[in-house]
Image: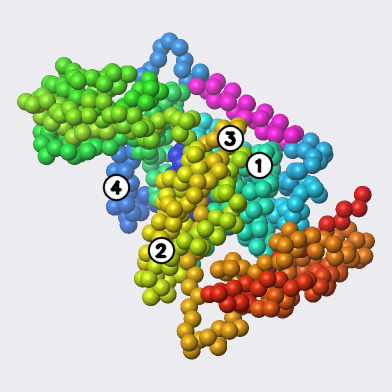
Amino acid sequence: MSWSHYLLQVNIYLVVFYAFYRLLLAKETYFVFNRIYLIGAGIFSLTIPFMQIEWFGKQAISQQIYVQVSQINDIITQPITAAPVQHGFNWGLLIAGIYLIGTFFFTVRFILQLYAVKKMLEGVKSGLAFSFWKQKVVAQNLPEVATVNHHEDIHIKQLHTFDVIFFEILGIITWFNPIIYLYKETVKSIHEYLADEAAAKFQGDKETYAILLLNQAFGVNTNKLTNGFFKKSMVKKRIFMLYKERSKKTAILKYGIFVPLFAAALLLSSATISKNEQILATAENIKLEDVKEVVAEVLELPSEKTVNISISPETKVKPPINKANTNDGTEGFYKFLGSNIKYPSTAAENNVQGNLIVSFTVTNKKLENIIVDPKLGYGADEEVSVNLAKYQGNALANGNYSMKVEYRLSGSPTKILNESIVAKTGYTALNTVTIIGYAKPDPENQIYSFISIENPPTYPGGMDKFYKFLSNNIKYPEEAKKLSIQGKVFVSFVVEKDGSLSDIKIDRKVGYGTDEEAVRVLKLSPKWNAGLKNGTAVRVKYNLPIAFTLNQKSVNQEAVQDNTVYSFVSMENPPQFPGGMTQFYKFLGDNIKYPEEAKKSAIQGKVFASFTIEKDGSLGDIKIDRKLGYGTDEEAIRVLKLSPKWIAGTQDGKPVRVKYNLPIGFVNNKG
């Protein structure tokens, strides 16, 4: 087995294993199993080419299976052709040279990254938080430093650096395969999900932890080999996974059933791939520009040169099929178009989209007299005619054919040129072919993410005012009320440059009229203060959960619910400290005395307390939900007992008991 043959097989298995992961496992929250799967995928990809199972094919019971594998092998190898023997320039040596140069470059890059990590560990900078192997750096000036410490401890205990180093080395070997970079990013994301899960439990409050990520993630750079706490590109995914509903136990069956079956299928296929003469010849003579294309064709995946293409059966007229073709009729013809036609760069850059009609004659397998009329221009006509001329298949019988080709740019509002054209009469009409490209983002109309904008949009008076606006205007749907339906409607909308709300959508429904009510109220919203980027107003997408909570009462329930303790966040009119929360925090700051025991031991952190604001405004049932120790817990309780009376919360116009959760920070600011 040659080195090029081995590399080809390794990259095939890497692509297949990752495709399986994206298809069935990526959305599951069994992060430990996902981590094991990805590491196993890398290891199996490296080792499967060496596995010998010839004895299996010799057993009588396996002959039928071997026949099927052989048929699969015929399909796999069909699109691959060995390059003709070159008597001039040695392309094989050129490819080998380029591969070795790339390997050398990424090896040097890896060594430099290791050196950079060493320098980072030696010279700690303010604001950094990362870990590498058993070492970590957590700047003491970071907020919630105890939580960040715990986060990095998880990286160390679970040996996350091993995964990073493993895929870095694998990436050096397979640097030309774009899939390996997806492996790297996916594994790092799983590391963060695992650490976030543990850190959020330690924090005691997912919302507080999510806000910590948002507030601290921007503008902090760490080495790619380290497990950094603050990584801007991962923040959105990390917060999403933090709140994502945990996968059901039945999802484990995906790991227990599909993975072994999938691995067995690969072992069977490897028995023929490793012996196939055509693949061996291709591996020996493959051109550099064909490396990625061959991998894509073997797995029947779209390559970099492939455009998104769809066949629209708009006409009932079907072309005659050549009886000599025993395969799939015209499917091979359309497959050829999908593998070769691409959206012309000139057309894409100019946001040109439209239709053209191409007609041609088939004579003894050859496509002749290729004419494009009407034309679209910008390279689209040449792209179709040139690639049709290359077709050498046997799918179409002799005759005259006409085909409509549509060029469409996803996300482009530009006019469709030649919109009303139809296929020529007197020709056999082929199915319409649609070629999809992607428009360049228009800076004027680009929509930014709320969490990535430097100055996000704000509601006049702040978000408290916005929530009050929602509370005052939302009417509980009668259908939902009758069925006692409660829950959160997750909506998204775009805050336009003038502050108005547009593109209001329901991302996750509750139903029973709640979704429509959420949209109705958002349409009533006053204009916001627009988001700014580089001092200029921009369009910003905003995601928002709107809670629908029933607080039902009846005459018989009145006495029972008289002492109900409500959640602070679900209140119609929540309790308030006299003068507002700013005055409450001032009261705490003026009265808390740093315990001597905590001071001597340099203890800092947060005590998480909870208490009930009674109907008369006094504080009762004061508890410590998460302790810090060294006298800090007792001090927090002592000061809360000194609190003046609050303005009681009200529900349906009546004062009620309300539970409040509060983190109290103890920070030793001595020099």
Labels 4 and 1: the sequence-earlier one? 4
Badge 2 is on which residue?
A: 514
- Secondary structure category for the residue under label 1: loop
Labels 2 and 4: the sequence-earlier one? 4
Q: Position of residue 668 (x, y in %)?
A: 87, 56
User: Quick one: label 3, few (<14), some, or many (20+) residues within 10 Å?
Assistant: some
Are the residues flagged by discs 4 and 1 in contact, CB closer than 8 Å? no
Are the residues flagged by discs 2 and 4 in contact, CB closer than 8 Å? no
- Secondary structure category for the residue under label 4: helix
Q: Amino acid at mark 1?
A: Phe
Judge by depth and name the residue closer to the eye, 202 or 569. Answer: 569
Residue 559 in the image: above or below residue 424: below
- Whether residue 466 appears in magenta in the rendering, the answer is no
Badge 3 is on which residue?
A: 533
Q: Which residues are magenta?
A: 95-116
Badge 4 is on which residue?
A: 67
Q: Amino acid at mark 3?
A: Lys
Q: Amino acid at mark 4?
A: Val
Q: CA distance from mark 1 to mark 3?
A: 15 Å
